[in-house]
Amino acid sequence: MTLRADEPASAAVRRVLVERLAELRRRVGIVLRNDDPAALHDLRTALRRTRTVLAETKEVLPDRIRLPSSSGLRRLSERSGPLRDLDVLLGGLGSSPELAPLRELLGRRRARARARLVAELSSTRQEGLPWSRRLEALLRAPRSGAGGWPLPPGGPGVGSLVARRARRRWKRLLRRGAHLDARSSPEDLHALRIQARKLRHLLEVFREACPPRQRTHWIVRTKRLQRTLGDLHDAHVGARELAGAARELARSGAPARSLRAIAGCIEGYERREARARARFEGRFRELAALDADRLAPPKRQEERGSRRPRVVGFRRAR
């Protein structure tokens, strides 16, 4: 999708959200037809990006338009999480014969999680994502001005909107991470990961409205922090889940060699978590060092016409 930084935010957000909803429905269809971990990952990414658009466009989308769809998106995110977690676990086990009992146990859990997700996607509540079609109908409706939607032509540019929202999201991330270090709890670091993910999705969805060189710097550094924290979270959860699975297998009489192999996997996850913790502070400093002023649209875009309002820039967070 092509966006201009000086395009009125209401029109740009309308177009972006219609595209996101269509992509989301397409991803749901693929997951229903294919039991593929990559397809599920793509669906969850589409869910997060759509949620980001709704959350970060309060200035141009009234609550009566945003909120009804937010609950449907949140429900799908929650229902698809367990299956994704099991895909990550199974994907890291390899084909060692000693781990066959573990693969069988996790495979049964995965089959149940997949069945629950398919039932949810096929339910009356979610089939065809009716809430997304109602939202799209509102977005495509002729201008009425009711409830403040949409903003009149010549309103704030989308580049200015994205700059303001990214600045707020960035400063919130810095405040949350300022007191964290490599020894912080997995829960606190995971909460920071969520903030980084939201900032990344905002910049990626509206990338065409951001200065090209700066958006690359911001997306790359945000992605590095998010992936480091993601490795840490996956390793922590993996070690915990495998420990529980080992206890269950021990009660059912699994061979000692299988239990030793699982213990080796747990140690591997613990080493992976330690490596991610060692990278964390450097990745956080990289993102904190960026100059937020440069995310604002160039001044020449403000000067194209007097109809456009002055673009709001950033100040470096203190």
Image (cartoon, rainbow, N blue to C red):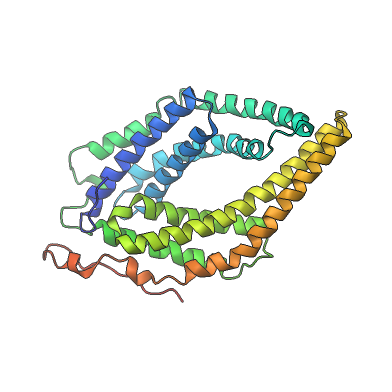
Seen at 62% across and 67% down, the residue is: 180
111 sits left or right of 143 in the view: right
Write the residue at 54% across / 66% down: 284
| Residue that lies at the very extreme toward the bottom in this rendered image | 318
| Residue 296 in sight here | yes
Total numbered circles: 0
Asked if residue 1 lies left or right of residue 316, the reply is left
Foreground pick, 65 / 126 = 126
- Give the percent coordinates (x, y) of residue 67: 40, 43
Judging depth in this view, the residue of 261 and 184 nearest the camera is 261
Residue drawn at x 48%, y 28% as measured from the top left = 31
Q: Position of residue 214 (x, y in %)?
A: 35, 64
Q: Please determine whether, in this image, residue 102 is positioned above or below residue 188.
A: above
Q: Is residue 314 visible?
A: no
Residue placed at 82% from the left, 35% from the top? 258
Which quadrant is home to the N terminus?
Answer: top left
Figure quadrant of residue 238: top right
Q: Position of 308 compared to 203: left or right?
A: left
Looking at the image, residue 275 sits to the left or right of residue 255; the answer is left
The quarter of the picture where residue 309 lies is bottom left
Percent position of residue 273, x then y: 68, 55
Between residues 5 and 224, which one lies in front from this camera angle? 224
| Picture quadrant where residue 146 is located | top left
Q: Position of residue 121 (x, y in %)?
A: 49, 27
